[in-house]
Image: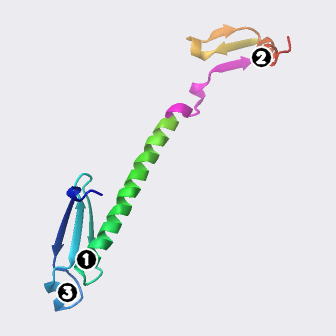
Amino acid sequence: IDSKDLRIDFKTGSGPGGQSMNMSANHCRVTHLPTGITVTNQDTSSQLENKNLAMEALRSRLLQKQRQEAEEARACLRSGQVGSGDRSEKIRTYNFKAGTTIDHRLGNGVKLPNPREMVAAAAGLD
């Protein structure tokens, strides 16, 4: 993480912990400016430790966001290739009883030769 992309603020803590907790500036807030992710930490009484803990939390959140974006991109790409699997996506209809094959990709259902002949030709049984 580049330091120029960060805004680090220290302020007095809040909550239980006594008067010294509320007087010393040990509450750390780290903001990643490009993404707007903000992490706060006031677990310890040390300013440096709180800063390091907040930086670790920020790194993990940025990594999680990066992984999520990559997963979404991969899922979008995959769904475009695979399709939805609906009946409307069918390519051909074979009607062995009537002896017709309809190819739905060629417009309004172009009739092709007998499906038995097509299967035999594809299998090399001619």
Q: From the image, which quarter does the N terminus lie in? A: bottom left
Q: Label 3 sits on what residue type? A: Met
Marks 1/2: CA–CA distance: 72 Å
The residue at 43%/41% (across/down) is 73
Front residue of 63 and 17 = 63
What residue is disc 1 on? Answer: 48
Query: Residue 87 magenta-drawn?
Result: yes
Q: Nearer the viewer, residue 21 or 79?
A: 21
Q: Is residue 90 left or right of residue 97?
A: left
Residue at the spot x=30%, y=80% of the render? 43
Mark 1 → mark 3, Cα distance in angstroms:
15 Å
| Image spot of residue 62 (x, y percent) | 35, 57
Rate crowding at label 1 as few (under 14), some (14 to 19) or many (20 or more) other CA atoms within 10 Å: few
Q: Secondary structure at mark 3?
A: helix
Disc 2 marks which residue? 122
Q: Amino acid at mark 1?
A: Leu
Q: Residues within 10 Å of mark 2 (few under 14, many from 20)?
A: few
Compare marks 2 and 3 and give the one earlier in the sequence.
Answer: 3
Q: Is residue 45 above or below residue 10?
A: below
Instruction: Name the amino acid, label 2.
Output: Ala
For mark 1, give the secondary structure.
helix
Bounds of the magenta span? 80-96
- The answer to whether 19 appears left or right of 122 in the picture is left
Look at discs 1 and 2 and give the one toward the viewer.
Answer: 1
Residue under numbered circle 3? 21
Eyeballing the image, is 91 above or below 79? above
